Amino acid sequence: MGAPENILDVASLNPDYLGFIFYPDSPRNFETEIPELPGSIKKTGVFVDASLEFILNKVEQYNFQALQLHGKESAEFCKVLRDSLKQRDAASEIEIIKVFSVKDEFNFSRLKGYEGQVDFFLFDTKGKNKGGNGYTFDWKILKDYPSTTPFFLSGGIGLEELESIRKFISVFHKNGKEHLLYAVDINSKFELAPGEKNIEDLNKFSNSLKGLQPI
């Protein structure tokens, strides 16, 4: 996210999460203040191989409710982060979302060490950038998803992917695992410029997504 007025416009659509990227190599790197948002929206800090101290400082500064880790953060790092958040606030319910980049295949055994250390997984498209590559990976890879940890679907998702999302939802619905597909994460396909979102297209997508029914 970028300018405060654009942030507020996005917030008016009442998304479940709203992400703010803290990664100097990203054109979306966030360096301003977050305006006051509705309590129903989980402010989410997005990090790439940041230090524990850096993440905790941003949590303190912005009062994040969720953290998205896009780098090579180990399961042990996630455990230390979770423990540190608890030490900061014993009642802390800050969610940790661990991101994995996917292209043509994925070794699901990589998830095992993270089970119980994070709240969600997020599967994004593997590309030259840490997110925001603008194209999808082969979602069929996830059809036999073996984990019980819910996940976010991400990577180049735009208005043209709505029918594909409906088919993807149907696969999990038929297998009785619809609860595992927790959320759809969107970004670059809805940008007018890095960090500036197209509100009209976001509104179309949000309304259409809410109306999707399994086949």
Image: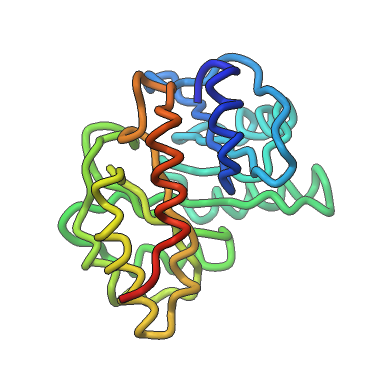
Query: Quadrant location of residue 104?
Result: bottom left
Query: Quadrant location of residue 153?
Result: bottom left
Q: Is residue 33 left or right of residue 212?
A: right
Comparing 150 with 165, the one in front is 165
Query: Quadrant location of residue 196?
Result: top left
Residue 198: x and y in percent read: 40, 28
Compared to 71, does 97 lie above or below?
A: below
Q: Residue at x 66, y 28 (%)?
A: 58
Q: What is the total number of numbered labels drawn onto the structure image?
A: 0
Comparing 21 with 207, the one in front is 207
Q: Residue at x 54, y 32 (%)?
A: 10
Compared to 131, does 61 lie above or below?
A: above
Residue 163: x and y in percent read: 26, 59
Q: Is residue 177 left or right of residue 89?
A: left
Comparing 99 with 185, the one in front is 185
Residue sitting at the far bottom: 175
Residue 186: x and y in percent read: 40, 42
Q: Quadrant of the image for the C terminus?
A: bottom left
Colour theme: rainbow
Q: Residue at x 73, y 53 (%)?
A: 93
Comparing 209 with 65, the one in front is 209
Compared to 179, does 24 lie above or below?
A: above
Residue sitting at the far left: 104
Residue 131: x and y in percent read: 34, 37
Q: Residue at x 52, y 59 (%)?
A: 120
